[in-house]
């Protein structure tokens, strides 16, 4: 064997001996340190998961309210950005507060008793200060519950003031 091979062999034997003795201490505690290292990794993983699960983002043009399993809907409204919650105990409810168009069709009678099929385009958005009340009473689909009935009533009252010919020309 060459001198380089002998030196490499001595080096690998020294490394193996040192790793078996944990730096020269022959206490026989190799299993304990392995479990401590694994436990540390598990604790680090659980901590990272808990941090990730406790953060949520509110995008631009949106607002959030929190629902708590203990106290129900909280009054605080959260603006854009990253916010903290307690996992499993709190759930963020995110609302789009930008003006959204909605088309509502209605069959309505005119002043001269003719039936007219008319479509109305409505731009609506929730009042930000009232989001906790909206969620508590109407839920997430508040616009689907409220807008059709209101728009139909207003359309009927406005269209009933005109004749069919006036609706076409004006």
Image (cartoon, helix red, strand yellow):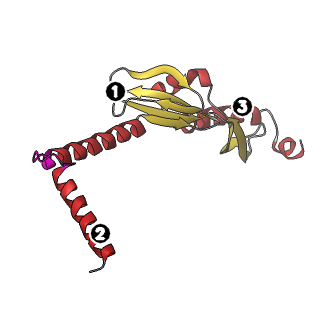
Task: Using the image as rendered, state which of residue 81 and residue 13 is in the foreground.
Answer: 13
Label 3 Cα crowd, 10 Å radius (few <14 / some 14-19 / many 20+): some
Does 1 sit left or right of 25 as displayed? right
Label 2 Cα crowd, 10 Å radius (few <14 / some 14-19 / many 20+): few
Does 124 sit left or right of 89 as displayed? right
Q: In the image, residue 120 lies at what x, y percent?
A: 72, 42
- Give the mark nearer the N terminus: 1 vs 2: 2
Residue drawn at x 28%, y 39% is 43
- Give the mark nearer the N terminus: 2 vs 3: 2
Q: Residue furthest right?
A: 169
By secondary structure, the bulk of the magenta-drawn segment is best described as loop
What label sits on residue 69 in the rendered view? 1
The residue beneath circle 2 is 7
Label 1 Cα crowd, 10 Å radius (few <14 / some 14-19 / many 20+): few
Magenta-colored span: 22-32
Q: In the image, residue 139 lies at what x, y percent?
A: 48, 32
Tag 1's secondary structure?
Answer: loop
Judge whether residue 121 is colored magenta.
no
**Mark 1–mark 3 distance (CA, rounded to whole Å):** 44 Å
Residue drawn at x 53%, y 37% is 57
Q: Is residue 140 visible?
A: no
The residue beneath circle 3 is 157
Q: Nearer the viewer, mark 1 or mark 3?
A: 1
Q: In the image, residue 59 lies at what x, y percent?
A: 59, 38
Residue drawn at x 45%, y 21% is 74
Tag 3's secondary structure?
Answer: helix
Quarter of the image where one finds residue 50: top left
């Amino acid at each position: 064997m060459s001198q380089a091979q002998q030196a490499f062999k001595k080096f690998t034997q020294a490394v193996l001996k040192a790793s078996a003795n944990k730096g020269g201490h022959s206490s026989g505690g190799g299993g304990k340190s392995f479990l401590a290292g694994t436990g540390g990794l598990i604790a680090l993983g659980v901590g990272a998961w808990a941090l990730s699960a406790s953060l949520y983002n509110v995008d631009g043009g949106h607002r959030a309210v929190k629902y708590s399993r203990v106290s129900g809907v909280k009054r605080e409204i959260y603006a854009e950005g990253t916010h903290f919650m307690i996992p499993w105990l709190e759930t963020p409810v995110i609302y789009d507060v930008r003006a959204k168009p909605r088309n509502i069709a209605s069959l309505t009678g005119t002043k001269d008793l003719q039936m007219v099929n008319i479509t109305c385009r409505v731009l609506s958005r929730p009042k930000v200060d009232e989001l906790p009340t909206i969620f508590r009473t109407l839920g997430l689909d508040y616009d689907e519950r409220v807008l059709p009935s209101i728009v139909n009533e207003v359309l009927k009252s406005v269209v009933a003031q005109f004749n069919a010919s006036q609706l076409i020309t004006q």
